[in-house]
Amino acid sequence: MTNLLDINNLTIRFNGKRTVHAINDVSLSMKQGETLALLGESGSGKSVTLKALLGLLPPKRTQIEGSIHVNGTDVLSLSGKALRRYRGGEVSMVFQEPALALDPVYTVGHQIAEAVMRHKGISRDDAMSTALDMLDRVRIPSANRRLHNYPHELSGGMRQRVMIALALACRPKLLLADEPTTALDATVQIQILLLLRELQKEFGMGVIFVTHDIGVAVEISERVAVMYAGQIVEEGTTREIIREGRHPYTQGLLAANLHDVARGERLNAIPGAPPALETRPEACSFAPRCPHVLPACRECRPPMVDLSERRRVACLRAQETIAAE
Amino acid sequence: MSAIDHAPDTAGTAPEGPLLVVQDLQKHFPVRGGLLGRTQAKVQAVDGVSFEVSKGETLGIVGESGCGKSTTAKLLIGLTEKDKGDIVFDGQSLGPDLSLKDLRKSVQMVFQDSYATLNPRLTILDSVAFGAKVLGLEDPAGLASKMMDRVGLDPDRFAHRYPHELSGGQRQRVNIARALAMSPRLVVLDEAVSALDKSVEAQVLNLLNDLRAEFGLTYIFISHDLNVVRYISDRILVMYLGEVVEVAPVDSIWAAQAHPYTRSLFSAMPSMDPDNRTKVPPLTGDPPNPINPPSGCRFHTRCRFASEVCKARAPKLAGLSENAAHLVACHLHDPASGHPDAGQGLPS
């Protein structure tokens, strides 16, 4: 069976007044039906990766190298009709801010039905009943009435459910979720996470879930890829990353989560700030902030080391046991 | 630099009393509409909030959006005018004894959006020195560069830069320096670390802890992140739809939440254990709209334990029988409330 997703040596550069090396040599693969969390801070390249997967980056200013294959389709070569069929059909996306992603002048039922009509070529009535069914599946109470609501008439949690219904209406093989719970309250966030988990099982699709919150990644995903400065620095199962994160950056993120820190105890903060990506990184991007840095780290990009099957880390000291701090 | 000459003036009128007492604070925002722009409804943003903060203490305020935590903060320093209620700062009541201008010398605020709260046309040094200049203090620039140094921004490198040239973490340090330049005794931090990346957040939390010890500060720390609030606070105050539902020392509330809402809020935190993920969401639906909050106990519409008395009558904030420092507003903890399960505490 082919992999659901194969990204090979993806490099993305934005040209303009300032050049930004947003993604640097990222390779990633996913099997059918897997849930992967892309974990990282702002500017680490998580959202750019998702946008590249949907072909949403502005072509004039973007220089893309490498390849992306979804179910064997070469995504970067798609255009016109094929690209429209692929977006929303094969792969769809849930955005962080549903209030901005939904169209304010159409009812939510209309928006879902429109997507279904475009992709499946069925009548408006059939599409509306699909929309109703989708609203039921995302557990919107009295879905029949909500079908005719405008986005502003719904609460934040409800809007995000509509967004998910819209994304899943055409049964994509891969769902991209870009921080879909960040704008929601804590008690609503957990509802949406559990809903996504159930729907993933029900529909059997693959999910890439972008987040900066380790706790959220633990709740939603089986696998985690940690990103820093446009590169994947570590990948493994969620269990491996949480229990024995090997990259010093992963360890720093875990410590900064404050999960088990005693009150008032000094935090093991990573010093400094992420690098500006104006030049292509020629050394380990994390070296200036790393507590375990070696002279060699500043001389070359650390190669990706495979620790075991589908468990890899980009650190020169990966083989040594770096005591978890 | 010396911490001594910059230490806050602690010669208040009531050395033993709490630094801040808030009594029955209320703010309702009118919702206008219709042809004549008449008031059609009121957002009950803050409704009868009372609490105390002791000297040197950090009080954490948590709650979901719309619960009134930020409005409470703004009412405290008069950025929003209160409808009613008393604010007593160090024994002096705001209004009769203490002018707003004097209160603001002692109470400073740090906001969430570090960019929006800095004047883009002022250099960092001018921003930090602004308050001292307005008050006519001696050598505002010297004070400002001392404060910048203290929050970890090298004055030689940063003094003449503008806000847009700094990262989010650096800008938040500027905001903290600007607040501290006024030698405040109380600092209100409204989601001050929420917009920062996790690794930078940890740096700023360390800084806040250091500054508290050095200057003998008292903090009110508002956040939606329970882990952060637990880390920095001595006591936690939980708000729901404009009301206080629970106030308790951190260890006590972490061990056992007394209010059903607090318990739901705590169990909504993502688990950090991949083998023990959350299975059932603790609450369904979103928080109700504060325009027409539910009658009686405002949480009764989402509460598993609600009974008739909860719809009819609002519970009062009172100490638990086993721990008087742990206050909760719930009929379940009041044997005389008339709730069928009253007096047995919160069922599991």
Image (spheres, coloured by chain):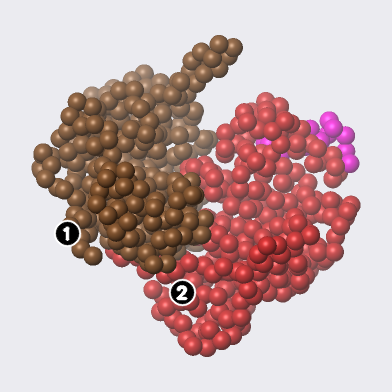
Chain colours: A red, B brown
Amino acid carrying label 2: it is Arg
- Check if mark 1 and mark 2 are on a common chain: no
Badge 1 density bin: few <14, some 14–19, many ≥20, Cα 10 Å: few
In this orientation, which residue lies closer to the viewer: A187 or B25?
B25
View extreme (top): residue: B36
- Residue at point 53%, 61% (across, down): A41
Instruction: Tell me if residue B39 can be seen.
Output: yes
What are the residue bounds of the magenta stretch? Answer: A121-139
Residue B4: mark: 1
Q: What residue sits right under mark 2 in the picture?
A: A289
Instruction: Tell me if residue B309 can be seen.
Output: no
Q: Main secondary structure of the magenta part?
A: helix
Amino acid carrying label 1: it is Ile
Residue B101 placement (x, y as % from top left): 27, 35
Camera-near label (1 vs 2) is 1
B9 vs A230, left or right, is left
SS class of the residue under badge 1? loop
Residue B329 placement (x, y as % from top left): 30, 31
In this orientation, which residue lies closer to the viewer: A180 or B12?
B12
Chain under callout 1: B
- Residue at point 63%, 39% (across, down): A99
SS class of the residue under badge 2? helix
| Position of B198 relative to A109 (above/below) | below
Q: How many marks?
A: 2
Residue A193: mark: none
Mark 1 → mark 2, Cα distance in angstroms? 33 Å
- Residue at point 76%, 32% (across, down): A110
